[in-house]
Image: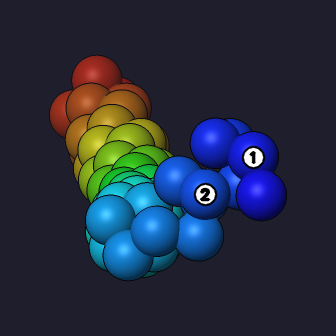
Amino acid sequence: MSDETSWLLSDEFVAFSTKIATIYEDKKQKKQQLKEFYEKITNDLKVLDQQALDLEKDFQKWKKTQEKS
């Protein structure tokens, strides 16, 4: 058995690779959470923009009624 194979089969390497796999999965999960949060905030901002547009339209309508008076 070569030195390369020997350390690949060691308990230390198995522990190391297990920990790395856990870190990788945690990182993947965090990225998914970040993506979901970003999408939620983006949608919230769109709602707020639409509310502002609706208010502006209502205000412009009111303004026109004041000009006629």
Residue 11: x percent and y percent?
A: 38, 76
Q: Quadrant of the N terminus?
A: bottom right
Q: Give, as a three-letter code, the residue at label 1.
A: Ser
Q: Give, as a three-letter code, the residue at label 2.
A: Ser
Residue 66: x percent and y percent?
A: 22, 34
Instruction: Identify which residue is drawn at 27% across, 32% down.
Output: 63
Instruction: Identify which residue is drawn at 61% across, 57% down.
Output: 6
Question: Where is 66 relative to 40, above or below?
Answer: above
Q: Are marks 2 and 1 in contact (CB under 8 Å)?
A: yes
Q: Residues within 10 Å of mark 1 (few under 14, many from 20)?
A: few
Q: Is residue 15 left or right of residue 1?
A: left
Residue 37: x percent and y percent?
A: 34, 63
Tell me the CA gap for discs 2 and 1. 6 Å
Q: Which mark is residue 17?
A: none
Q: Quadrant of residue 20?
A: bottom left
Q: Residues within 10 Å of mark 2 (few under 14, many from 20)?
A: few
Viewer-proximal residue among 66 and 14: 14
Residue to which mark 2 is pinned? 6
Viewer-proximal residue among 11 and 68: 11
Residue 36 visible = no
Q: Quadrant of residue 61?
A: top left
Residue to which mark 1 is pinned? 2
